[in-house]
Structure formats: structure tokens, C-alpha cells
Image (spheres, grey):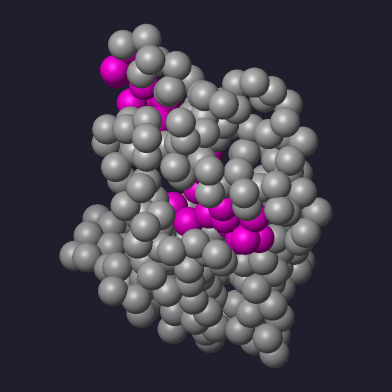
């Protein structure tokens, strides 16, 4: 093994904190979610450098072991990280290990945790349409005796629904691993967490049409209230198939 492979999280933090080029250290993943770590949890650490700074720490670029994964990037690159891709949630929930900029790192993370109104509204409409599409297909497949197809489409619908609900709440959707953790601590506005998760679990596992329809009725009411009625109206008469009978 090389010296890099033996590097521990604590040892690297000490090394980085002594380097003036480092303006921030941010820990993401299970280590940033209290109670979610296991014996297999590593440390995923962002190392943020002052723009155009020179440092010998770049020798650790791409470092990845069962103990420690490092991402080394400039402050400008860190501002753009996860915007708007899947990494956004991980950074939104990240824990600050070092912030030499008087709260700048904290503000960057806070900005990633809150979707602006305009960047949430249009994607929410697209997720609503995708949710309705999968729900409609599931109900049709169930009607036609295609049980597997109905369950698979129902499972897809839940994925789109969660994207929709978090977009409506102007938050990045958590990874599945952290969904229950997040909702237990920060529920979606207007939704009962236990009932929502029970419905999602039941629909994903069984494709039960009556549960899908009851959930859709709740979603439709919310979507229309916040201005997405046109997305639903575009489905025309097919909406009757999605609604409770």
C-alpha cells in the first residue's frame, strides 16, 4: 500500500487545515446525517481551495479509499458543484468541517439547499407530467391484466412523485437512502410523512390502483393550488382514469 492509501480522515483534515490555500472543508454523505453511519461508511470530503491558489494538496486529487474520498476544487468550482445535478442534495445536507471565509461556505451550502422559485416551478411541472404518465400507464396495465407492467409503472410513478413534491417544497430531493431520515426531521409542507411513506411503500410493492388514485387526488389538489392545473388539464378525459372511482 502507498502512504496515500493509509491516509485517515483526521490526518487529512489536520494537514488541510494547516494549508493556507484551503478555505473550506465540507463533509457529505452518511457522515453528515446523524445516525446514518455504519461500519462501511467512509468520509466524503470536499476540499475547497482559494481561486487560483497553489498547493501541494493537489497530489491527493482523485484520492479514494474505503476510509476517505477526496474532491479537490476551487471556490468557484464549489459554487457551481451540484447545480443542478444529483450532487446538489449531498451538498445541501453537507457538514462544514472548516470555513475560513467567515460564513461564505455556509452560505453556498444554504443556497444549494433552497431552490429559487423559478428553478422549482418549471421542473415541478415536468415531474407532475411524468408522474401522471406513469400512474396512467399503471392503471391501464392493471385494467388489462398486465400485473408486472402495472407494478413497474407504479414504482416509476413514485420516483417522479417524490421529485415533484420536493420541487414544490423548493428543496432538492434526497437520495433514497436518506429519504426517511430527511422527512422525519424536515417534513414536506402540507404532507403527513407517515401516510406519504406508507402509500409510497404500498404502491411500489403492489401497484395497488385504489391507493394510487387516492394519492393522485391529493397531488392534483396541491398541483392545481400552486398553478400547475394546465399540466393536468392537458390529460383531458384520461384524468378520470387516474382519479378515485
Residue 241 pos. (x, y %): 52, 24
Closer to us: 203 or 74: 203
In the image, taking residue 75 as reference, residue 154 lies left or right, namely left
The outermost residue toward the top is 144
Q: What residue sits 31% from the left and 11% below the top?
A: 145
Closer to us: 228 or 159: 228
Residue 77 pos. (x, y %): 70, 59
Closer to us: 50 or 185: 185
Residue 96 pos. (x, y %): 53, 79
Q: What residue sits 48% from the left and 20% below the top?
A: 137
Q: What residue sits 64% from the left and 32% below the top?
A: 129
Residue 164 lies, with reference to residue 191, above or below; the image says above
Closer to us: 243 or 114: 243
Which region shows up in magenta?
A: 146-175
The outermost residue toward the right is 118
The outermost residue toward the bottom is 102
Task: Give residue 14's quadrant in the image.
Answer: bottom left
Residue 94 pos. (x, y %): 50, 70
Considering the whole magenta stretch, tell me its main secondary structure: helix
Q: Is residue 85 visible?
A: no
Is 155 inside the magenta-drawn segment?
yes
Q: What residue sits 69% from the left and 77% below the top?
A: 107
In the image, taking residue 189 as reference, residue 66 lies left or right, namely left
Task: Give residue 207's quadrant in the image.
Answer: top left
Residue 178 lies, with reference to residue 139, above or below; the image says below
Residue 156 lies, with reference to residue 142, above or below; the image says below
Quadrant placement of the N terminus: bottom left
Is 28 inside the magenta-drawn segment?
no
How many numbered marks have been drawn onto this rendered protein structure? 0
The outermost residue toward the front is 245
Q: Is residue 144 visible?
A: yes
Residue 146 lies, with reference to residue 169, above or below; the image says above
Amino acid at each position: 500500500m502507498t502512504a496515500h492509501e493509509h491516509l485517515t480522515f483526521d490526518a487529512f483534515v489536520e494537514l488541510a487545515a494547516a494549508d493556507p490555500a484551503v478555505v473550506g472543508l465540507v463533509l457529505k454523505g452518511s457522515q453528515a446525517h446523524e445516525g446514518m453511519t455504519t461500519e462501511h461508511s467512509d468520509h466524503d470530503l470536499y476540499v475547497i481551495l482559494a481561486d487560483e491558489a497553489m498547493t501541494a494538496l493537489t497530489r491527493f486529487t482523485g484520492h479514494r479509499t474505503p476510509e476517505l474520498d477526496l474532491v479537490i476544487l476551487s471556490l468557484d468550482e464549489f459554487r457551481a458543484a451540484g447545480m443542478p445535478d444529483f450532487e446538489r442534495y449531498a451538498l445541501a445536507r453537507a457538514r462544514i468541517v472548516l470555513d475560513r471565509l467567515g460564513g461564505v461556505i455556509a452560505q453556498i451550502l444554504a443556497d444549494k439547499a433552497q431552490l429559487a422559485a423559478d428553478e422549482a416551478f418549471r421542473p415541478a411541472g415536468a415531474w407532475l407530467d411524468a408522474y401522471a404518465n406513469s400512474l396512467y400507464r399503471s392503471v391501464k396495465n392493471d385494467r388489462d391484466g398486465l400485473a408486472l407492467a402495472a407494478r413497474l409503472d407504479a414504482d416509476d410513478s413514485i420516483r417522479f412523485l417524490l421529485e415533484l413534491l420536493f420541487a414544490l417544497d423548493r428543496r432538492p430531493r434526497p437520495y433514497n437512502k436518506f429519504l426517511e431520515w430527511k422527512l422525519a426531521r424536515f417534513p414536506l409542507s402540507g404532507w403527513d410523512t407517515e401516510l406519504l411513506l406508507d402509500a409510497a411503500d404500498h404502491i411500489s410493492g403492489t401497484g395497488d390502483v385504489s391507493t394510487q388514485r387516492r394519492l393522485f387526488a391529493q397531488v392534483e389538489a396541491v398541483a392545481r393550488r400552486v398553478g400547475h392545473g394546465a399540466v393536468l388539464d392537458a390529460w383531458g378525459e384520461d384524468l378520470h382514469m387516474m382519479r378515485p372511482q
